[in-house]
Amino acid sequence: MRKHLHTARDFILPVIDFFYPPFRRFMNLQTFRYAASGGGNVLLGFLIYTLSYKFLFFGEEFDFGFYAFKGHVAALFVSFCITFPIGFFMSKYVVFNDSNMKGHIQLFRYFMVCMFNLALNYLLLKILVERLGMDAILSQVITIVVVVVISYLAQRNFSFKATAANDDEE
């Protein structure tokens, strides 16, 4: 399994790095990799959200029998389930590969940040769609901007913080 992860990384890194030179004056390579891989994952998540909202849930409530989700919330959870593992892979192996923290610690921290981001996204959608009456797709675009900024800071300084070799046991 680890060999496949490194093979994927060895394919993805040169593709992302190929587009870096014009951005060299504006940001360092790690920030560019985060923007490229995170941006790709955000676009994937937005595509999944939009398709789920319009064609899976048809903008209606999704009833589990014990709980009913509004269409925009159900679409958010579908999107999260797909983008979470992709985002972790990209963060661990492509963006923050300088971190020597143990993988299970990174995964736990990444999960915690993602849960916070999911809760923030959920809260913002509830306010924008249900309280302010905004369109669900436009509301998701607005929440993405807020969540991406918070996510980068949290992932860089918490989940994948580059540590001294003896600090990886936390």
Image (spheres, rainbow, N blue to C red):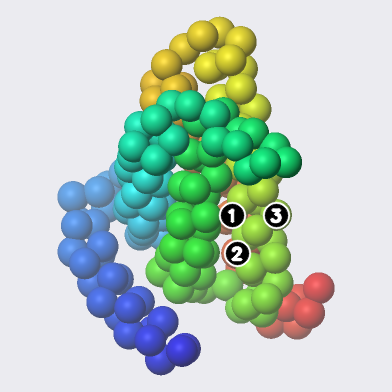
Residue 76 in percent (x, y) is at 51, 39
Query: Marks 3 and 1, how far apart in space?
Result: 10 Å
Q: Is residue 36 above or below residue 63?
A: below
Q: Quadrant of residue 109 in the image? A: bottom right
Q: Is mark 2 in CB contact (under 8 Å) with mark 1?
A: yes
Residue hosting label 3: 112
Residue 2 in percent (x, y) is at 47, 88
Q: Earlier in the sequence, mark 2 or mark 1?
A: 1
Q: Say what secondary structure mark 1 lies in.
A: helix
Residue 156 in percent (x, y) is at 57, 55
Residue hosting label 1: 155
Q: Is residue 145 above or below residue 86?
A: above
Residue hosting label 2: 160
**Frontmost residue, 95 versus 119:** 119
Q: Residue at x 38, y 86 (%)?
A: 4
Q: Quadrant of the C terminus?
A: bottom right
